[in-house]
């Protein structure tokens, strides 16, 4: 089978199209014939050994998102059958409950091989049915970005109708957060560096938008838009250059879901605001199988359409990563397999 893997040394230059023997499922395992994969921001960091000593020794098959069809099952598997269309789950050991080290210890495309392959053999518990109304590319966008947004706003955030939610940027996690917040009946403010992208966010349901380039003090503006005491819940992907503004926008008792540190991971902010506003800073790293199942049910019920920006062919992984790094995309970048 063909794979796209980092081999030899941890650099982008050593990201290569290669081949492995076709894997066979053992007891309790299934083989997924992958049909699509999707990129996440972290896939820019993986080839540079960005997640350190916890990463699998080389070679490492890239990417954590995918969708495909089960084409073989090992002895003892009763929950999944050949022909089922599934997504491999980001965390292979996290079925449900709160995060702990064991549950966070086995993610695709980092601690173990990822989805950029013709086949992956995984435990039957490590895959879940894809929503039937989605095509393979759309289904491939779900395991990482969508589950992250779901856990932030729904399982952990427990947002309610009428809540004011702010999402930063228009990348994969943020557009799922916009879509889930609208499903939950929230009012959503979206920030972006681009007026064109903000117009597209409004077409997706955003109630208000702010260009964070032309309005670097967007926190005050967001607070004005939210009215009352400020924003109830913020999906924080920027980190260093955005948390200060988020602390201006958040209402007393509000939640900031810390999801990414795109602008840097070190901080010089007024921590007193966290204290005096009773802010809940909630770290989020994707989510569990239970999160995926609840989210898939909601996606199916509402026939939600993930936003796919652009599709590359299997051999074009370098070009897809280059495109991701430009930040031009709106939503998800996918790979055909
Ligand atoms: N913790 C987790 O479980 C988890 C899971 C997935 C992702 N993440 C993290 O979350 C972040 C986003 O991931 P992603 O895959 O959604 O990325 P992505 O699709 O590449 O989206 C990035 C977008 O974020 C926006 N952005 C960049 N810098 C910004 C800034 N300083 N302020 C506000 N917005 C900014 C830009 O939107 P505009 O072009 O509209 O300005 C950019 O297009 C990354 O740090 C990633 O590692 C975390």
Image (cartoon, rainbow, N blue to C red):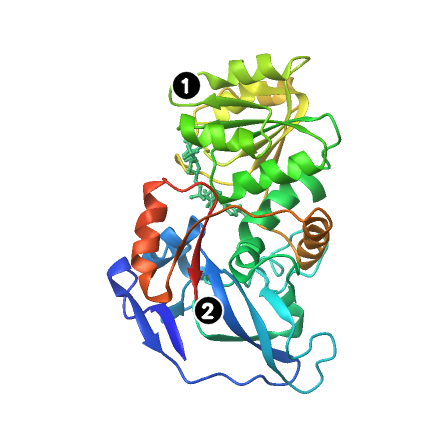
Name the mark on residue 174.
none
At x 65%, y 40%, the residue is 180
Q: Secondary structure at mark 1?
A: loop
Locate the N terminus and report the quarter of the image it occupies.
Answer: bottom left
Q: Quadrant of residue 123?
A: bottom right
Q: Residue 160 at what x, y percent from top left?
A: 75, 31
At x 71%, y 84%, the residue is 76
Locate the C terminus and report the quarter of the image it occupies.
Answer: bottom left
| Near-viewer residue (252 or 177) | 177
List the residue tagged with mark 2.
113
Q: Earlier in the sequence, mark 1 or mark 2?
A: 2
At x 40%, y 28%, the residue is 194
Q: Secondary structure at mark 2?
A: loop
Q: Is residue 106 above or below residue 72?
A: above
The reply to whether residue 111 is visible in this rendering is no
Q: Residue 55 at what x, y percent from top left?
A: 43, 62
Ligand 1 located in image quadrant: top left
| Near-viewer residue (306 or 256) | 306
Asked if the residue under mark 2 is in contact with the one under mark 1, i.e. CB atoms within 8 Å, the reply is no
Q: Residue 15 at what x, y percent from top left?
A: 30, 64
Q: How many marks?
A: 2
| Near-viewer residue (44 or 204) | 204
Residue 297 placement, left or right of 331: right
At x 65%, y 35%, the residue is 181
Residue 271 placement, left or right of 337: right
List the residue tagged with mark 1.
216
The reply to whether residue 173 is visible in this rendering is yes
Measure the C-alpha gap from mark 1 to mark 2: 40 Å
Q: Residue 122 at what x, y percent from top left?
A: 58, 74
Mark 2, other Cα within 10 Å: few <14 / some 14–19 / many ≥20 = many
């Amino acid at each position: 089978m063909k794979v796209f893997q980092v081999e030899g040394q941890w650099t982008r230059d050593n990201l290569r199209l290669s081949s492995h023997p076709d894997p066979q499922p053992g007891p309790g395992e299934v083989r997924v014939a992958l049909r699509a994969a999707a990129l996440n921001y972290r896939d820019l960091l993986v080839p540079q050994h960005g997640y350190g000593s916890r990463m699998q020794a080389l070679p490492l098959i890239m990417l954590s998102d995918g969708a495909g069809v089960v084409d073989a099952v090992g002895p003892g598997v009763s929950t999944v059958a050949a022909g089922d269309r599934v997504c491999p789950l980001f965390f292979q050991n996290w079925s449900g409950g709160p995060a702990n080290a064991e549950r966070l210890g086995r993610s695709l495309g980092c601690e173990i091989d990822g989805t950029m392959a013709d086949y992956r053999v995984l435990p039957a518990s490590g895959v879940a049915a894809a929503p039937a109304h989605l095509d393979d590319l759309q289904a491939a966008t779900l395991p990482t970005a969508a589950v992250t947004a779901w856990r932030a706003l729904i399982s952990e955030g427990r947002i309610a109708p009428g809540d004011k939610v702010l999402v930063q940027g228009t990348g994969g996690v943020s557009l799922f957060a916009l879509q889930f917040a609208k499903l939950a009946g929230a009012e959503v403010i979206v920030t972006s560096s681009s007026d064109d992208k903000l117009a597209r966010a409004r077409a997706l349901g955003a109630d208000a938008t702010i260009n964070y380039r032309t309005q670097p003090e967007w926190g005050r503006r967001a607070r004005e838009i939210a009215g009352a005491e400020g924003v109830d819940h913020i999906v924080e992907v920027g980190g260093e250059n955005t948390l200060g503004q988020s602390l201006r926008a958040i209402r007393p008792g509000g939640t900031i879901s810390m999801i990414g540190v795109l602008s840097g991971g070190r901080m010089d902010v007024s921590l007193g605001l966290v204290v005096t506003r009773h802010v809940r800073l909630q770290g989020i790293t994707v989510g569990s199988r239970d999160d995926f199942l609840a989210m898939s049910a909601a996606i199916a019920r509402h026939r939600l359409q993930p936003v796919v920006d652009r599709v590359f062919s299997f051999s074009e992984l370098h070009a897809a990563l280059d495109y991701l790094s430009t930040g031009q995309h709106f939503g998800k970048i996918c790979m055909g397999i």
